[in-house]
Each structure stands twice: as C-alpha cells, then as structure tokens.
Image: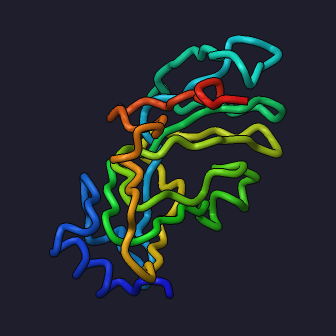
Amino acid sequence: MILSDKAILNCIAQGEIVIEPFDRACLGSNSYDVHLGASLAVYEAEVLDARKHNSVRRFEIPEEGYVLQPGQLYLGVTQEYTETHKQVPFLEGKSSVGRLGIDIHATAGKGDVGFCNYWTLEISCSLPVRVYAGMPIGQLIYFALDGEVENRYNKKQNAKYVEKTPYPVESMMWKNKF
C-alpha cells in the first residue's frame, strides 16, 4: 500500500519519516518531490572493478548548469536528507525528467527501513541535457510495511552507506565478500 499525502504528513509528525528541508509545496497526493543537489561525481577509471574501490572526481554544478553527456555515468545526490523508520521508501524519477531523457537510477530505487541519508542518484541521459542544482529530479513514494523489522539498515553491521554526507557516494561493492 502506498502512503497518501495525509499519511506521509502523519508519519512526519510522528517522526517515522524525516525530510530535511521539508517544503509542503513538494508534497504530492502520494509522493514527495526531491531536488538535485549541487554536487556531481564521475568515476576516474575507464574500467570499473567490482572488487576494488573505484575512486570518483566530485564537482559542483555551476550556476549556469551542467551539460550531462550520453554514455557517461554521473553520480548525483538529493538536496534532501531523509530518514524512514517504519516505511519502505522508493525513489522514482519525475516524468518531466524522464521526458528529457534522464534516468536517475539504474537499479537502486528502493530504500530500506532505517535508511537515514541523502540519496545518491545514478544519472544517465539519452541526449546531452543541461541540469541545474535545485531542479526537481525525483519523487519519494512510501510503502507501508507489514510486520516488525528485525534488522534496520542503519543498525546493520555490514551497512555500507550509513555515513551521512551531502555528496554522491561511489559504489561500495568492493566491501562485499565474493
């Protein structure tokens, strides 16, 4: 079951959902709009290795915007810091963003109960497109959870993305044992 606007507001009032900064105008009938943060990152290596820490180069989006290029993976970040303690958050791209040929995530649209951070975006595009810090980029949808959670993400010993940072975070796949 997807939470309605009233249910999201109720969860915020109860501290089950945190969105900072929160702007009531960004609340839709069953989602909350999030915005592109000021920082992007690109991987430095041409070939990425899943068993190694692949470093990134971070940079700020200038006032005049930044032109994304097809064939390049960009890591972006939301302006909003979020916490979800009893619901399952999903991040989807806004339809207006999709109609510009921008994808904001390749595989990581679902968050976990206990995720407390900014969202890293896996941005790619079909055509060159200029983006701006602060532009609406996606929407958070919250699903009700059936049952109690035994192992919240922010309490897991092997959770890889718990360090609070307003910058895009590169893959931590290398921390897995395989």
In the drawing, does residue 100 fall left or right of residue 13?
right
In this image, 69 relative to 40: left or right?
right
Front-most of 130 and 125? 125
Rendered residue at 38%/63% (across/down): 150
Please state the horizontal and vertical placement of residue 82, each as a whole percent of the image.
Answer: 33, 54
Where residue 125 sits: x, y (%)? Answer: 76, 43
Q: Quadrant of residue 3?
A: bottom left
Q: Is residue 161 left or right of residue 65?
A: left
Picture coordinates of residue 9, whole percent (x, y): 25, 78
Give the vertical position of 11 relative to 40 (above or below): below
Residue 103 appears in view: no
Q: Residue at x 57, y 14 (%)?
A: 57
Q: Is residue 23 visible to the viewer in this orientation of the structure?
A: yes
Count the marks: how many? Answer: 0
Q: Nearer the viewer, residue 40 or 150?
A: 150
* Colour mode of the rendering: rainbow
Considering only vertical position in the picture, is 135 above or below 56? below
> What residue appears at the point 26 percent right and 60 percent down from the top-left corner?
18
Residue at the spot 41% in from the left edge and 38% down from the top edge: 157
Is the residue 113 above or below the residue 43 in the image?
A: below
Above or below, comparing residue 7 to residue 41 in the picture: below
Image quadrant occupied by the C terminus: top right
Residue 26 lies, in percent from the top left, at: 36, 68
